[in-house]
Image (spheres, helix red, strand yellow):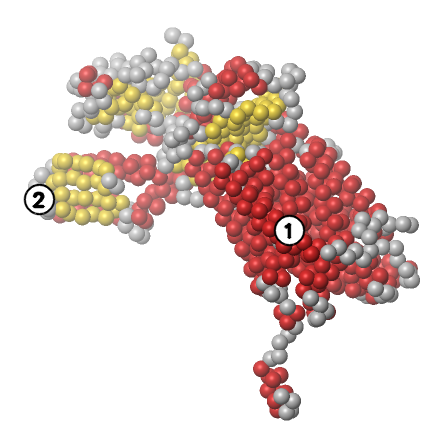
């Protein structure tokens, strides 16, 4: 039986030859992402912006009456609603942001929600309400705070773990790689203006986990090779390690990818943003493991000595006693 | 590597089968089969986003409770001083700025006043509820202590939770979850709800009912301008009543609260076909009500609900039977809601809905179907890829993957964990990522074979060398998973449950189980070469 081999044996791709241009590219990506986040902003859903979102299905029509819904809800005086198709032509999501100054009123979002639902039920008795989310300004603020806290805490905690298990340079390298992943994912959401909510933050946390997986596999091989090939120049050793783990990297990315694609295509529409983020993160994370996590080790001066036990004071005493020094 | 003592095999298989067996009731449930009722029936809970239902987060205003306490204290002080023998005369009573103060007409009463107040200030707990200070020898200032405020808040939230529970029970829904969260919040989760609007309007109503005498001496123009005469309060008429937009002045003291009710029923007044709520007082309330109406025949009293006047009828005759009827432009629905609210008692504090998540039952079922379909296709793709790449070793990974999913589901059922929509995504990710351990191991075996190691040595090194990275990767993933746990509300937590649980089952099935099977095969077949 002939088995499938995605990566030929003994590849010797010089990944790190282009480390400087790719590193510059990564920095540009990170900077560009943050620029996009700061200028365009993220399209916060109700989770983070507060307000009201209702999802409707018009089973008896071929198409949901989007323009007239927009007019109806806009006419209620809570500002311009976002009305868009949701998972199919018969379904819509209608989002009404919190009006200025309503952030502090606890029941404002619910009140708006009640008005919107009542108005729609009156005008379109055939509409089926699939779901309704209302989030007050205060709760949305708490979600924002806890999201930032969770992301920062997760990145720092795993970086510390890697520092302890490997060396400080590896911890810093992993932290930068994760920062890259989180930044670029945020940038993607700023540019596409896909709705950004709690699920997306959960997706980013999953990306952190996945990207780390990759980084650790490469790092583990680097550690092993550092012990094995003491004299090999670091760039060469990194290339060797990346090449040796390349088959695994491709294979694992592929299995995760083929598992996610059906969910993206056939899955429930309310999972689309989350799954899209994770799928994108798959590529971003693999890239950063090779081009962020690796080169940083070179520049931070990792050497074989990092993993070879240094002579202890007792050994030295013994040597002196034996007159070897 | 090949040595697998019997006890080790037994516990590996025992654990695997036990956990997988726990998943059976849930699988029966999903596929619409009946699980024999004589057997234990652990089930994975479906989150509201899959089962349909409402999640509400209610928040009480702590300031309201504080203000309410000051007001109650004022009433208590007035009563104590009035009932003292000889009476202690006081004036310049004021509440505000988080304190209540009053002036004694005569400085000589100070010690008596203190003595009377002492038991009230001490409260029922070990710490004092109020601090008392005397200014200028004649003015008494009462401030609630931090401990006193905490106790009051805690009591109010405790009884608010109870009231919320009673109201939801009246709706007759199945298995609502009502829990306090933090200092001032209550989480309400009601699965499979037909009418979320009814739930919301029921919980939005404080249902604080008061009967107060109308202040007939108040000047109408002052009342409409919102200026209350001394000893009186101004309330607006409720929306929908004939006097909407106008105000009524009522005497602050001497009224009756709704706390003394034993029953409330919605009904229709046969004389005019109006929707009404019939209320019944308990003995104490009935006596008070009788006294109030007997002493004030011919005068109007206001029925005030949540700070709005519903109606202000004249007292035509004393009402002695402890029964009364509230009329006030109700619809049959609002009358019914009010009756429920009155029966279950007034909320001790206003609750605002600060977060609502409602999912219709159709959408939930649709999500499950789509999620399962995607999961099936995804799993199939992973399996094909694994077997095509690693042959026999891929088949082992596939069997491990099946057990992985079953064990994860079983553990969740055993722990009564909740499966949410993001949790389904978590399952898909687990399936895609679980094989990573096998990929690492298998690739390593390939490498070692290429380097010329013998089959058994290659397999052994493969498992050993790959384990380090698998261990590190899963531990760091676990740490990131903890952050997920700490973050976010229900659905996202469901995602964390699956991801974190999946780490354990993936390592167990992907490393430990496959190793046992591979070892068994190697020992039996003793192959000189392997296809990998």
Q: Which residue is mark 1?
A: A22
Mark 2 Cα shell of 10 Å, populated few (<14), some (14-19), many (≥20): few
Subunit under mark 2: B
Discs 2, 1: same chain? no
Subunit under mark 1: A
Dot in front, 2 or 1: 1
Can you give x and y, in whole percent of width and height, for residue B27 in the image?
72, 39
Q: Assign the N terminus of chain B to one quadrant of the image.
A: bottom right
Residue A254 relative to residue B265: left or right: right
Q: Nearer the viewer, residue B155 or B351?
A: B351
Q: Which residue is mark 2?
A: B107
Where disc 2 sits, the SS reads helix
Can you give x and y, in whole percent of width and height, for residue B331 in the image?
43, 15
Q: Residue at x 49, y 20 (%)?
A: A73
Residue B269 relative to residue A311: left or right: left
Q: Nearer the viewer, residue B506 or B88?
A: B506
Can you give x and y, in whole percent of width and height, for residue A252 in the image?
73, 49
Q: Is residue B297 visible?
A: no
Residue B44 relative to residue B341: left or right: right
Quarter assignment of residue B97: top left
Label 2 – label 1 distance at C-alpha? 85 Å
């Amino acid at each position: 039986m002939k088995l499938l081999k995605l990566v030929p044996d003994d590849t010797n791709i010089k990944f790190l030859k282009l480390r400087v241009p790719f590193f510059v590219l990564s920095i540009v990506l990170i900077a560009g992402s943050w620029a996009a986040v700061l200028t365009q902003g993220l399209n916060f859903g109700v989770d983070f912006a507060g307000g009201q979102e209702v999802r409707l299905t018009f089973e008896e029509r071929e198409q949901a009456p989007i323009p007239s819904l927009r007019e109806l809800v806009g006419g209620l005086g809570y500002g311009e609603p976002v009305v868009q198709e949701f998972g199919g032509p018969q379904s819509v999501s209608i989002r009404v942001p919190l009006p200025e100054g309503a952030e502090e009123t606890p029941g404002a979002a619910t009140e708006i929600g009640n008005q919107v639902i009542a108005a729609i039920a009156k005008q379109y008795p055939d509409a089926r309400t699939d779901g309704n989310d209302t989030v007050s300004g205060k709760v949305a603020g708490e979600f924002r705070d806890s999201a930032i806290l969770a992301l920062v805490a997760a990145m720092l905690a795993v970086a510390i773990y890697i520092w302890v298990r490997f060396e400080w340079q590896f911890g810093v390298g992993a932290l930068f790689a994760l920062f890259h992943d989180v930044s670029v994912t945020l940038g993607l959401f700023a540019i596409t203006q896909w709705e950004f909510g709690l699920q997306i933050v959960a997706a980013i946390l999953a990306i952190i986990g996945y990207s780390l997986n990759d980084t650790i596999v490469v790092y583990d091989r680097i550690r092993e090779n550092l012990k094995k090939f003491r004299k090999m120049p670091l760039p060469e050793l990194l290339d060797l390690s990346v090449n040796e783990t390349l088959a695994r990297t491709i294979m694992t990315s592929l299995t995760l990818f083929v598992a996610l694609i059906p969910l993206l295509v056939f899955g429930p529409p309310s999972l689309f943003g989350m799954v899209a983020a994770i799928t994108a993160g798959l590529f971003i994370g693999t890239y950063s493991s090779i081009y962020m996590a690796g080169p940083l080790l070179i520049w931070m001066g990792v050497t074989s000595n990092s993993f070879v036990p240094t002579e202890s004071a007792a050994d030295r005493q013994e040597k002196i006693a034996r007159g070897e020094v | 590597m090949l040595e697998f003592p019997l006890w080790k095999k037994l516990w590996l298989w025992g654990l695997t089968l036990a956990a997988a067996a726990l998943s059976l009731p849930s699988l029966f449930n999903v596929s619409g089969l009946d699980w024999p009722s004589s057997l234990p029936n652990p089930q994975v809970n479906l989150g509201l986003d899959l089962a349909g239902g409402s999640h509400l987060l209610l928040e009480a205003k702590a300031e309201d409770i504080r203000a309410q306490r000051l007001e109650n204290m004022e009433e208590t002080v007035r009563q104590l001083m009035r009932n003292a023998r000889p009476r202690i005369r006081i004036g310049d009573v004021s509440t505000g700025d988080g304190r209540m103060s009053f002036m004694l007409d005569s400085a000589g009463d100070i010690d008596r006043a203190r003595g009377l107040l002492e038991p009230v200030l001490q409260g029922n707990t070990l710490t004092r509820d109020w601090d008392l200070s005397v200014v200028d020898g004649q003015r008494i200032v009462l401030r609630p202590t931090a401990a006193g405020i905490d106790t009051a808040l805690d009591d109010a939230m405790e009884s608010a939770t109870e009231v919320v529970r009673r109201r939801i029970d009246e709706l007759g829904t199945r298995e609502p979850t009502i829990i306090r969260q933090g200092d001032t919040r209550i989480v309400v989760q009601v699965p499979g709800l037909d009418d979320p609007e009814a739930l919301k309007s029921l919980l939005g109503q404080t249902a604080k009912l008061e009967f107060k005498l109308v202040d007939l001496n108040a000047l109408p123009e002052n009342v409409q301008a919102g200026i209350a005469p001394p000893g009186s309060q101004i309330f607006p008429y409720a929306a929908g009543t004939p006097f909407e937009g106008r105000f009524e002045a009522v005497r602050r003291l001497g009224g009756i609260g709704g706390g003394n009710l034993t029953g409330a029923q919605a009904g229709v007044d046969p004389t005019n076909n109006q929707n009404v709520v019939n209320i019944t007082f308990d003995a104490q309330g009935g006596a008070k009500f009788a006294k109030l109406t007997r002493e004030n025949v011919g005068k109007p009293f206001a029925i005030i609900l949540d700070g709005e006047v519903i109606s202000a009828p004249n007292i035509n005759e004393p009402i002695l039977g402890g029964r009364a009827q509230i009329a006030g432009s109700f619809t049959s629905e609002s009358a019914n809601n009010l009756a429920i609210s009155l029966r279950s008692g007034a909320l001790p504090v206003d609750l605002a809905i600060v977060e609502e998540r409602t999912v219709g039952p159709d959408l939930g079922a649709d999500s499950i179907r789509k999620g399962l379909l995607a999961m099936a296709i995804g799993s199939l793709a992973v399996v094909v890829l694994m077997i095509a790449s690693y042959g026999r070793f891929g088949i082992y990974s596939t069997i491990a993957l099946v057990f992985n999913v079953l064990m994860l589901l079983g553990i969740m059922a055993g722990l009564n964990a909740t499966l949410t929509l993001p949790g389904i995504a978590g399952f898909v990710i687990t399936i895609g990522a679980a094989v990573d351990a096998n990929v690492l191991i298998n690739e390593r075996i390939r490498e070692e074979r290429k380097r010329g190691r013998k089959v058994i040595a290659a397999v052994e090194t493969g498992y050993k060398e790959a384990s380090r990275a698998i261990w590190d990767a899963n531990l760091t993933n676990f740490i990131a998973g903890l952050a997920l746990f700490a973050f976010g509300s229900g659905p996202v937590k469901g995602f964390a449950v699956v991801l974190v649980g999946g780490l354990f089952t993936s390592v167990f099935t992907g490393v430990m189980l496959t190793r046992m099977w591979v070892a068994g095969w190697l020992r039996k077949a003793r192959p000189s070469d392997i296809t990998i």
